[in-house]
């Protein structure tokens, strides 16, 4: 063995072993790290809750569609915070209600739908806060501080998305009541040039810089210069969120029922077994046809599956059967990339190149085809995630994460291992590379 690349091969194997342990043990050296067992299963696997939330208003008036949409935003943000993406929220203006279908939380043993809905349906607290620049989190966002609250959501009369006549971009226009007008005037008078942040409970929503002392009781939050569909959706979402802090009604949960799993754990077990069998068959084919590179590819594909499961757990993506299909498809993309690379390597070896030169040229010449295939798949995943709902979002998220990791494993991990074994004298025979 010559050079340091041989050591890198074994370091990659060690890294994969550590990630595998984390994935199934959920910790490392006693430190809790989310793994596969912490992934939240969807309604189709674990069942869930079907509930109806009715608006309780003064004088029993019927809520408007705008008010119901605002309430829907509150629930959606709470579900986002819990990492529940497999959901179905529907407003029913005729009966003044919101129908919600969500899965049970991972590890749920009590299966009490009333307790779950009580947590999701409680009153949301919206606050405007002065930003302490010395207390931002690791992502650069302001942190919640009760002592920095300027005014609350009940001080806001209305919030609406509008097009900025000067910049052409989107903005959110705010209107305060008398108490809110005084509080906001006092705050903007001393915070010119500084930031004010908006929080829903303790969750950061948005922040804006104070441009001037505002005393009129009206204000605006400028969101940029774009007015496309995405900017409009952002403005509408922020306006709905702000209005949610001043809802004129509370939500009362009625008709709460448990949902039986649409497919059940048995379907998940069968899908997992099918995936394992498919992986073993692919590994056998790759080893038989490509020999040593096939073995390297099989190790990389195993790493791809492990890293994708970890990504799903860390990103709090709800796992549905369709989401698992996204993982399987990503593994297929990884196989495709390795086949393209290994065929290029074989061509270079047949052309008389040295093993190391053949590996480098094989990856270089296969790169454009791999990028094309991965980018087109990522575009499809983004479109499905943006326009889709329910389990389609789970599929889009897992596919997107899986394809990104597939590209990394095919281009980085397999190349590192291939260059590593090329330093081992016993691994330089052309026969080992399918020649």
Image (tube, rainbow, N blue to C red):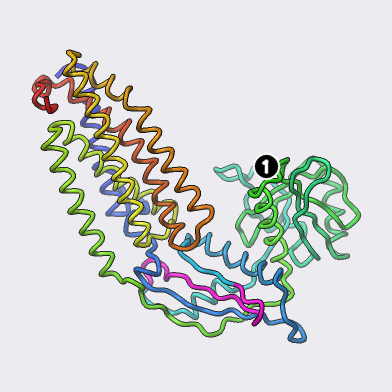
Q: Quadrant of residue 411?
A: top left
Q: Residue visible at 71% across and 60% down?
A: 242
Q: Is 375 left or right of 20, judged from the image as shown?
A: right
Q: Quadrant of residue 150?
A: bottom right
Q: Is residue 164 above or below residue 367?
A: below
Q: Is 106 left or right of 245, judged from the image as shown?
A: left
Q: Which residue is mark 1?
A: 133
Which residues make up the magenta segment? Answer: 91-108
Q: Quadrant of residue 210?
A: top right
Residue in the foreground of this view, choosing between 20 and 150: 20
Number of other residues with Cα within 10 Å of mark 1, as a class: few under 14, some 14 to 19, many 20 or more: few
Q: Residue visible at 24% across and 59% down?
A: 272
Is residue 99 on the magenta stretch? yes
Q: Position of residue 256 (x, y in %)?
A: 50, 82
Q: Position of residue 227 (x, y in %)?
A: 71, 45
- Secondary structure beneath dot 1 equals helix
Residue in the foreground of this view, choosing between 166 and 336: 336
Is residue 199 on the magenta stretch? no
Q: Residue visible at 28% across and 64% down?
A: 268
């Amino acid at each position: 063995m010559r050079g340091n690349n041989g050591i890198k091969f074994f370091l990659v194997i060690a890294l994969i072993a550590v990630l595998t342990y984390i994935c199934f043990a959920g910790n490392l050296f006693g430190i809790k790290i989310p793994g596969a067992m912490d992934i939240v299963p969807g309604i189709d696997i674990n069942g869930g809750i079907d509930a109806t939330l009715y608006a309780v208003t003064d004088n029993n008036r019927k809520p408007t569609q705008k008010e119901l949409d605002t309430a829907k935003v509150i629930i959606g943000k709470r579900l986002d915070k819990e990492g529940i993406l497999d959901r179905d929220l529907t407003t029913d203006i005729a009966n003044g209600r919101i129908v919600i279908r969500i899965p049970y939380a991972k590890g749920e043993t009590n299966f009490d739908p009333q307790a779950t809905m009580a947590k999701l349906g409680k009153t949301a607290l919206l606050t405007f806060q002065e930003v302490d620049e010395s207390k931002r989190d690791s992502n650069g966002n302001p942190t919640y501080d009760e002592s920095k609250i300027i005014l609350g959501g009940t001080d806001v009369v209305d919030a609406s998305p509008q097009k900025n006549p000067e910049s052409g971009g989107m903005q959110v226009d705010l209107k305060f009541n008398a108490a809110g007008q005084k509080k906001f005037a006092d705050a903007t008078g001393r915070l010119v040039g500084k930031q004010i942040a908006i929080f829903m409970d303790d969750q950061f929503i948005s922040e804006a810089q104070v441009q001037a002392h505002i005393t009129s009781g009206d204000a605006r939050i400028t969101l940029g210069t774009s007015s496309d569909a995405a900017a409009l959706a952002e403005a509408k979402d922020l306006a709905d969120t702000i209005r949610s802090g001043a809802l004129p009604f509370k939500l009362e949960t009625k008709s709460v029922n448990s949902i039986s799993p649409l497919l059940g754990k048995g379907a998940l077990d069968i899908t997992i077994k099918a995936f394992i069998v498919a992986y073993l068959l692919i590994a056998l084919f790759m080893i038989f046809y490509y020999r040593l590179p096939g073995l390297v590819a099989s190790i990389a594909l195993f790493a791809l599956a492990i890293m994708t499961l970890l990504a799903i757990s860390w990103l709090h993506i709800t796992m549905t059967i369709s989401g698992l299909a996204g993982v399987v498809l990503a593994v297929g993309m990884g196989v495709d990339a390795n086949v393209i690379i290994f065929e290029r390597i074989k061509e270079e070896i047949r052309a008389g190149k040295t093993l190391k030169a053949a590996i480098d040229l094989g990856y270089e010449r296969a790169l454009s085809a791999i990028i094309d295939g991965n980018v087109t798949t990522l575009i499809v995943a983004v479109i499905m995630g943006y326009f889709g709902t329910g389990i389609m979002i789970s599929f889009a998220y897992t596919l997107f994460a899986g394809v990104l990791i597939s590209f990394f494993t095919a281009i980085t991990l397999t190349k590192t291992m291939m260059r590593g074994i090329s330093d081992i004298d016993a691994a330089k025979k052309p026969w080992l590379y399918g020649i």
